[in-house]
Amino acid sequence: MEELKEEIADQVRAMIAGGFYDAEEIQENIMDIFYDEVLDEAWLKEEISRQYTARLQEQAAWPQETDFDRLARVFDQLNSSGIIALHNAGYTRQDGESDCGHIYSELKAEGITTRGYCFYHTQDLERVIEGHELYLAFGTFEADSLAVVAIGEEIVKVLAAHGFENKWDHTADTRIAIPGIKWQKRFGTENCSEERAVELLSNSVE
């Protein structure tokens, strides 16, 4: 049981460090992940509360503007230019591409044109929390490698404008890496939700 609790505590820690979920959502996620285990729900709730409170105290000491705040502005700018840019889009690259494709189809049905996409997924988030680079997937909705590269060039230009370095070989098959990013995301999704992306895309100008 103690080994299970340690594993759960690690999962809670990762979700809290990501900054995308509130305490109730974290509990629901844990219950889903460990659906085949008998969990001590009282302990789980207390553990989430303890870690959540500790993280809030850490956030109070963070700079007013964090790397994530700048990344959120990068994604806002991309969405406003007609490039679908999503945070924490699914667990895998396939999930993220599916999420972007869904938005593309929904907006297309409304007569709104999007030119490409950009996202990172939960596995990318887990790696950046551990101190690694953040990888951004990107592409278009047509089989045109030159158009894909053009989208990538736009993305790195916007990243540079917001003070981010990047590592990319300027090909369609390689994701863009952001080295040295410090993941400090405050709780809440006001500046990074899918709804926000859709709103910006709906009013985008190429």
Image (cartoon, rainbow, N blue to C red):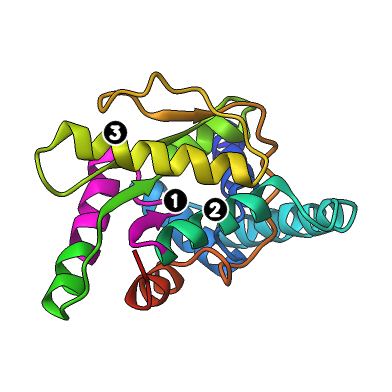
Residue 99 occupies quadrant: bottom left
Mark before the other along the chain sequence, 2 or 1: 2
User: Which mark is in front, 2 or 1?
Assistant: 2
| Name of the residue lying farthest toward the bottom | 110
Q: Is residue 102 magenta?
A: yes
**Closer-to-camera residue (156/65):** 156
Check whether the beta carbons of the residues at disc 3 and disc 1 lie within 8 A of each other.
Answer: no
Q: Is residue 169 above or below residue 142?
A: above
Rounded to the nearest whole Å, what is the CA distance between mark 2 and mark 1? Answer: 15 Å
Mark before the other along the chain sequence, 3 or 2: 2
SS at mark 1?
Answer: loop
User: Which mark is in front, 3 or 2?
Assistant: 3
SS at mark 2?
Answer: helix
- Magenta residues (range): 81-103
User: Which mark is in front, 3 or 1?
Assistant: 3
Q: Position of residue 73 (x, y in %)?
A: 59, 58
Q: Is residue 191 above or below residue 156?
A: below
Residue 204 occupies quadrant: bottom left
Specify the amino acid type for callout 3: Val
Report the quarter where the N terminus lies.
top right
List the residue tagged with mark 2.
Answer: 74
Q: How many other residues sit within 10 Å of disc 1, few (<14), some (14-19) or many (≥20)?
A: some
Q: Is residue 99 above or below residue 120?
A: below
**Closer-to-camera residue (11/56):** 56
Q: How many other residues sit within 10 Å of disc 2, few (<14), some (14-19) or many (≥20)?
A: many
Q: Position of residue 69 (x, y in %)?
A: 67, 55
Q: Tell whether 164 sits left or right of 53.
A: left
